[in-house]
Every structure is written in structure tokens, then in C-alpha cells.
Amino acid sequence: MAATHSERMAAQGSASPIANGSDTRDRYAAAGLSDRCRLRHVENTYIRPVTDLELVTSIDPNGANATRTANAVADHWFDLSGPRDTLYMPNANHIGVGAATADGVVYITVNLC
């Protein structure tokens, strides 16, 4: 799911939760994960929407190798409270990561469940 979304973002040339007419909810539903990936908020007060379970971004690696590019993306996400909270979601047991390139730009998707 993450790899396909990254490929679609690369094809459209834009990092976005919407690519090829499909949004996060559509992808989780098509993969049969909408009901399975029902993660509770840390205070256990509500079930998170699947839109909270996906991160997308793009980066121009500017000649950096794959490790440096991945580190730059991780650093970016961990510097921002929203993505950092998503990555530290305590009750997520599965992660999917996808990456695709187009015109020298890397498009990355992370899906949690």
C-alpha cells in the first residue's frame, strides 16, 4: 500500500495524501485495513481515524546516497510534533514504508497499523 502510494505521488510529481484520485481512507479500505487498523489515542479516549496513520513527504536528495536521504526524512519527521507522534504511536504493531523516485525527487509513504 505504501509503495503503491509513493509510486502514484511520484507520477503526479507531488507529495500528498491524495494521489491518482485515492486518499488515505480509500487505501486502507481497499487493503481491507480500515477495521483492522483501529488504533486508540494514547489517552484511550477515542479511535484514531486512519488519516492519522499515514505520513507522506518528498525530498530532493541532491546527490546524497539512500542512507543519508532516509536519515533526512526521519530527521524531518522527528522534528515535527505531528509526524513524531505518529511514528511513536504506542499501539501500532505494523509499519509499511514505500519510496519511489521521479525527476530526482524521492517520494516516501509510511503506513501504520
Image (tube, grey):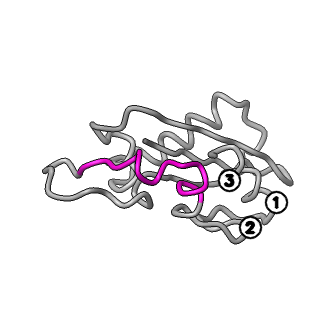
Q: Secondary structure at mark 2?
A: loop
Please, what is the dominant secondary structure of the magenta stretch?
loop
Given contact means CB atoms under 8 Å apart, are the residues at marks 2 and 1 in contact? yes
x, y (%) of residue 59?
66, 51
> In this figure, which residue is indicated by the disc labeled 2?
20
Magenta region includes residue 82: no
CA–CA distance in space, label 1 to label 3: 10 Å
CA–CA distance in space, label 3 to label 2: 9 Å
Q: How many residues crowd around disc 3 within 10 Å: few (fewer than 14), some, or many (20 or more)?
A: many
> In this figure, which residue is indicated by the disc labeled 1?
11
Q: Secondary structure at mark 1?
A: helix
Looking at marks 1 and 3 on the same chain, the residue that comes earlier in the sequence is marked by: 3
Q: Which residues are magenta?
A: 27-40
Q: Residue at (61%, 55%) from the top-left corner? A: 30
Q: Amino acid at mark 2?
A: Asn
Q: Amino acid at mark 3?
A: His
Q: How many residues crowd around disc 2 within 10 Å: few (fewer than 14), some, or many (20 or more)?
A: few
CA–CA distance in space, label 2 to label 1: 9 Å
Q: Residue at (65%, 66%) from the top-left corner? A: 22
x, y (%) of residue 20?
74, 67
Looking at marks 2 and 1 on the same chain, the residue that comes earlier in the sequence is marked by: 1
